[in-house]
Amino acid sequence: MLSPGDVAPAFDAQPLFGLQVQIPPPAGKRPVVLCFVRDFASPFGRAAMATIQARYSDFDRQGIALVVLTRTELTRARDFVPRMHVLAPVIVDVEGDIFRSYGIGADRMLKGTLKSLLRPDGVHALRQVLTHGQGARHDGATLLPAAFVVGADGRIALARYETSITASPDLDALLECALSC
């Protein structure tokens, strides 16, 4: 798992739509926010994308790149992104190389997810997520979401590994960190 101060694993990838994404950011560029989300077939992945979509303009106005990474099947992602009017660049990492390099794991026994559902707001949160549909069968059903802020120096400024498959990125914390880098 990566921690603040660690050098971010480098990658250069082409999103489904948009310009090439390079980590670390080229010299003179602002920090980059990376949101690793579940498969778009999952209601949890779709809920995370709805959250990101609703706040994408806040990042864009500040000149902060917010990039979504998913292991969604390429055909499904190519359908989902334009149909849902996703503005954020989406990188499809079907093989999982970028996910592995950032230490993104799975809740194999679903312990963290069950704990989150047992909290007082857990059932309400689950109902909210299910408004995005029941989803379809997909690989990586227990893949945990994560988010990072990669500073202009190529180092991790913020690393958030979630413990529940139901989690969505804390975009307020990510934006605040990216603006202070």
Image (cartoon, rainbow, N blue to C red):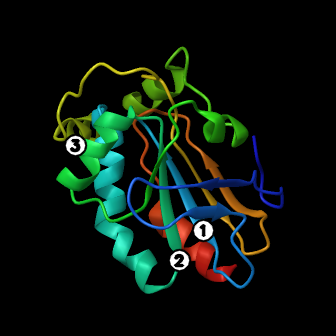
Give coordinates of residue 8: x percent, y percent: 76, 56
Q: Which residue is mark 1?
A: 32
Three-letter residue code for mark 1: Val
N-terminal of the pair, mark 1 or mark 3, is 1
Q: Which residue is mark 3?
A: 128
- The residue shown at (35%, 69%) is 55
CA distance for labels 1 and 2: 6 Å
The quarter in which the C terminus is drawn is bottom right
Give coordinates of residue 92: x percent, y percent: 47, 43
The quarter in which the N terminus is drawn is top right
Quadrant of res 59: bottom left
Question: Is residue 119 shown left or right of residue 135?
Answer: right
The local secondary structure at tag 1 comes to strand
Q: Which residue is mark 2?
A: 64
Mark toward the viewer: 1 or 3: 1
Q: How many numbered marks, from 0 up?
A: 3
Front residue of this view, candidates 137 and 167: 137
> How busy is the neighbourhood of tag 3: few (under 14 within 10 Å), some, or many (20 plus)?
some
